[in-house]
Image (cartoon, rainbow, N blue to C red):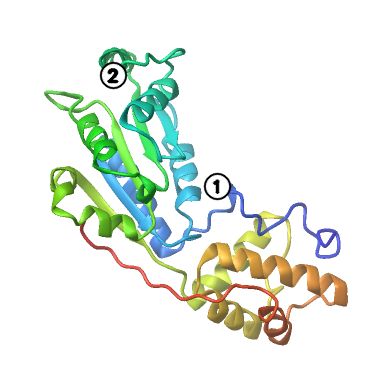
Amino acid sequence: MYKGFYGLREKPFSKTPDPRFLYLSGGHEEALARLQYAVEERELALLTGGIGSGKTTLSRALMDSMGDGYRFCFMFNPILTPVEFLRILAWNMGVEAPPAAKDDLLRELTGRMYRFHADGIVPVVVVDEAQMIPGRDVFDEIRLLTNYQLDDGNLLAVILMGQPELRQKLADPLYEPLCQRIGIHYHLGPLSLEETLEYLDFRLGVAGGAPGLFSPDAVMKIHELTGGVPRRINSLATAALLEGFARDVTLIEGDMIEDLSEELDVHGTGSGHDEPC
């Protein structure tokens, strides 16, 4: 609808985790660098961030950046029993009919790990929304994955991604054995005002448009209303493009953003910092 009006080839503020649209703010660039290091060194890493901060998009960009020699296994719904977790992991690693019995599952996984190693492939297990893992048993299985080792290092990398409450959960002494094995920690914070401007212009550019579609006042309003959270920015920016098209205006001004704020639930603030488990 609005794409032709604004000279866009595609939607610039889609909510899908397309790594082409990943704007590397200072925080996102640092997070990506740490995850790359964790994968290269076959570490257990913990990445947290608020809802819509860009964690899933970062994981896709990570996969694209690593090239050959890595097999990424994404776990999107971790509300599982230990056996269910291991069966899905085995299937992701190429086991066509994962056994139902845990002993058989572990035997299959062990064999698969060593075959990957012989072929020069590093498995990378990415557990998204890890704060939803229901209890200690699945976390114990994740910890035990780091026991797949040779004398010179681990056989796989594991990345736990989740909302800030994941850190709160892991702060319980029950999870101390797991926390001791986490080698990389990072918390992804929101965008600053300057980064919000760059984010909007970057995504417009990827979609084929020109920068400067949002006035400085509009950018300030967007940042204020969204707290710098990318997913909230996407929602508000999309609504602004639709409204701008309806009003036949080529520049999105602050008053339009103010009007839209009364219709959309985009209010929010956030902060982020790097901290241990």
Say left or right for 239 vs 75: right
List x then y, in percent, for residue 70.
Answer: 39, 28
Q: Nearer the viewer, residue 52 or 78?
A: 78
122 is higher (above) or lower (below) than 190:
above
- Mark 1 — residue? 19
List x then y, in percent, for residue 115.
Answer: 31, 12
Distance from disc 2 to disc 1, alpha carbons, whole Å, reads 36 Å
Q: Residue at x 31, y 15 (%)?
A: 101
Q: Residue at x 29, y 49 (%)?
A: 46
Q: Amino acid at mark 2?
A: Lys
**Residue 151: quadrant of the picture:** top left
Q: Give the label on residue 102, or none.
A: 2
Q: Amino acid at mark 1?
A: Pro
**Residue 223: quadrant of the picture:** bottom right
46 is higher (above) or lower (below) than 98:
below
Q: Residue at x 18, y 55 (%)?
A: 172
Quadrant into which the C terminus falls: bottom left
List x then y, in percent, for residue 218.
Answer: 65, 81
For mark 1, does the 10 Å Cα neighbourhood hold few (<14), some (14 to 19), or many (20 or more) residues?
some
Quadrant into which the N terminus falls: bottom right
Give the mark nearest the N terminus, 2 or 1.
1
Identify the secondary structure beneath mark 1: helix
Q: Nearer the viewer, residue 36 or 270?
A: 270
Q: Nearer the viewer, residue 231 or 144?
A: 144
Say left or right for 273 vs 3: left
Q: Residue at x 41, y 36 (%)?
A: 66
9 is higher (above) or lower (below) than 258:
above
For mark 2, does the 10 Å Cα neighbourhood hold few (<14), some (14 to 19), or many (20 or more) residues?
some
Identify the secondary structure beneath mark 2: helix
List x then y, in percent, for residue 87.
Answer: 39, 23
Say left or right for 247 vs 211: right
Q: Nearer the viewer, residue 7 or 243?
A: 243
